[in-house]
């Protein structure tokens, strides 16, 4: 009789957990995955995928506006929010089915219920069943964080609810200045909503190069989005069908919806971590892990957003694969978190990888060379002066990058083409190594 029911129990059916389960099963492990909501996790169900579908949909109006410059006469178009949401739901359901099918084809058993840790080798399902396992992998992701409780916080929606609104709001106030806030600002504005962004910092996109921040803000404001910085929402009142957001600067804004997108926190509540001594990283609130994703409990690992290291789906997938290689493939592998490409699906879009100008200067001093290019393409010349939507580049060049230890790994480069930066990084990296100056490509 086997010592345990399974070799690996994965809590969470998102991208990272699914990859770990499939790879572990490929090595011959008996694997079970528990998912209490829907297979696919944040990215597939209420994150990257539906968001990108909304982004694409919001761009259609721009293409219609541009058409006249290319000789097209298009009758006045109408937009139906409910149709788009319904079609988005169909696509997400299709992808969810593929996730589940691929996991089951790998020989992994899926249980659609919540699982909590009872002891180092036992999990209790919400059904009452208990399962014993040699290893536990926690891949429960993150969840929206609304910050401190304020009067009227119950009126606030997050990105989760934004994907399921029954109608397009006429006016939207969004608190936050990062990825999610700016992406939804562009989405709602693209569909015709009046959008105001409220952010506590001095400018949006904290952590990005200053000229990228300035360029994105200028383009968003040119598109009609109001951006208020240096203030926060202190309370929200409901008045008839609208909401009044009161700001720390003494002003107030009326809107149909109020959305908070100030960040996400690791989904660690009520998992039973304290029963097995799994430590929490005091600096970020995520599960503390080593370079191989092992927690303070020797047979328990954690990957993805629940560790609050680099909260990106491709990183979670890589961490899950590395975990399976390490534990079941006898190939110790640590996921590399350096120079990870990232994209912001704002309007205009942003894609970056490597060091920012400020960090590069701090690390390498006077050896840093910076160039910025705002090229003009035929598309923009034919569209009656519409805002540049695709073009912004920063490159940071360090001397001797063919021999420098840093540059022989990944030379830093910044470019706003989100899809290119995420899918074609090797091409850009190799090009950067072959040239003696900045590299850019549309």
Image: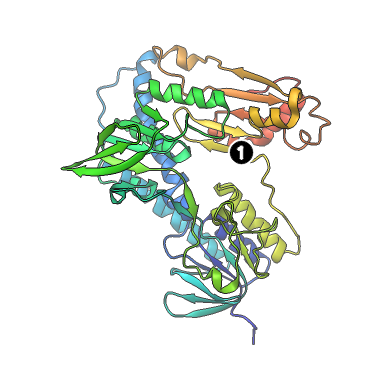
Which colour scheme appears in the figure? Answer: rainbow
Q: Which residue is mark 1?
A: 341
Whether 20 is drawn above or below 86: the answer is below
Rendered location of residue 107, percent (x, y): 57, 68
Image point 69% across, 58% down: which residue? 292
User: Which of these two is toward me, 371 or 37?
Assistant: 371
Q: Is residue 73 left or right of residue 334?
A: left
Quadrant position of residue 250: top left
Q: Position of residue 391 (x, y in %)?
A: 52, 22
* Residue depicted at 41% across the width and 62% down the height: 37
**Image position, residue 268 (x, y; %):** 50, 62
- Looking at the image, residue 269 sits to the left or right of residue 279; the answer is left
State the residue in front, 321 or 216.
216
Work out which quarter of the rendered image holds the N terminus and state it.
Answer: bottom right
**SS at mark 1?**
loop
Residue 168 can be seen in this image = no
Q: Kindly give the residue lying farthest to the right in the view shown.
A: 403
**Residue name at image x 56 percent, y 66 percent:** 10
Q: Which of the 4 image quarters holds residue 383? A: top left
Count residues near mark 1 (Cα–Cα under 10 Å), then give few for <14, some for 14-19, many for 20+.
Answer: many
Side of 28 where 145 appears, left or right: left
Residue 21's place in the image compared with 178, above or below, is below
**The C terminus, quarter of image:** top right
Residue 87 location in percent, x, y? 34, 45
Task: Inspect this view and state whether residue 283 appears.
Answer: yes
Name above or below for residue 199 compared with residue 235: above
* In the image, farthest residue toward the bottom: 1
253 vs 84: above or below? above
Q: So how many labels did they put on this image?
A: 1
């Amino acid at each position: 009789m086997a010592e345990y029911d399974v070799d690996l129990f994965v809590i969470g059916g998102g991208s990272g957990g699914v990859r770990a389960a499939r790879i572990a099963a490929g090595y011959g492990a008996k694997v079970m995955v528990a998912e209490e909501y829907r297979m696919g996790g944040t990215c597939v169900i209420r994150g990257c995928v539906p968001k990108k579908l909304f982004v694409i949909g919001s761009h259609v109006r721009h293409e219609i506006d541009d058409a006249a410059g290319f000789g097209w006469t298009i009758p006045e178009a109408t937009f139906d929010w409910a149709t788009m949401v319904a079609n988005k739901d169909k696509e997400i359901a299709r992808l969810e089915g593929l996730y589940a099918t691929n996991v089951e084809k790998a020989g992994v058993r899926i249980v659609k219920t919540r699982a909590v840790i009872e002891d180092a080798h036992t999990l209790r399902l919400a059904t009452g069943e208990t399962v014993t396992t040699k290893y536990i992998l926690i891949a429960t992701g993150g969840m929206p964080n609304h910050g401190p409780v304020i009067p009227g916080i119950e009126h606030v929606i997050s990105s989760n609810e934004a994907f399921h609104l029954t109608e397009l709001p006429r006016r939207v106030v969004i608190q936050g200045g990062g990825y999610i806030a700016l992406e939804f600002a562009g989405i709602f504005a693209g569909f015709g909503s009046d959008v105001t962004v409220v952010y506590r910092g001095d400018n949006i996109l904290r952590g990005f190069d200053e000229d990228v921040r300035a360029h994105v803000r200028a383009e968003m404001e040119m598109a009609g989005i109001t951006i208020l910085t240096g203030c926060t929402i202190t309370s929200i009142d409901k008045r008839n069908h609208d909401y009044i957001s009161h700001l720390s600067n003494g002003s107030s804004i009326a809107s149909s919806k109020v959305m908070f997108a100030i960040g996400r926190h690791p989904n660690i509540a009520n998992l039973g971590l304290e029963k097995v001594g799994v430590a929490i990283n005091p600096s970020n609130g995520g599960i503390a892990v080593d370079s191989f994703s092992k927690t303070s409990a020797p047979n328990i690992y954690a990957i993805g957003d629940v560790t609050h290291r680099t909260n990106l789906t491709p990183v979670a997938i890589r961490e899950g694969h590395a975990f399976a290689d390490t534990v079941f493939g006898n190939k110790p592998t640590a996921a590399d978190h350096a120079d990870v490409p990232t994209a912001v699906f704002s309007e205009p879009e942003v894609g970056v990888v490597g060091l920012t100008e400020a960090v590069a200067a701090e690390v390498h001093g006077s050896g840093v060379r910076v160039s910025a290019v705002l090229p003009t393409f035929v598309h923009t010349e034919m569209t009656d002066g519409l805002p540049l939507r695709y073009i912004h580049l920063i490159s940071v060049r360090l001397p001797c990058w063919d021999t420098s230890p840093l540059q022989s790994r990944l030379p830093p480069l910044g470019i706003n083409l989100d899809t290119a930066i995420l899918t074609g990084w090797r091409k850009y990296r190799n090009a950067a190594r072959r040239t003696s100056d900045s590299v850019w490509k549309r």
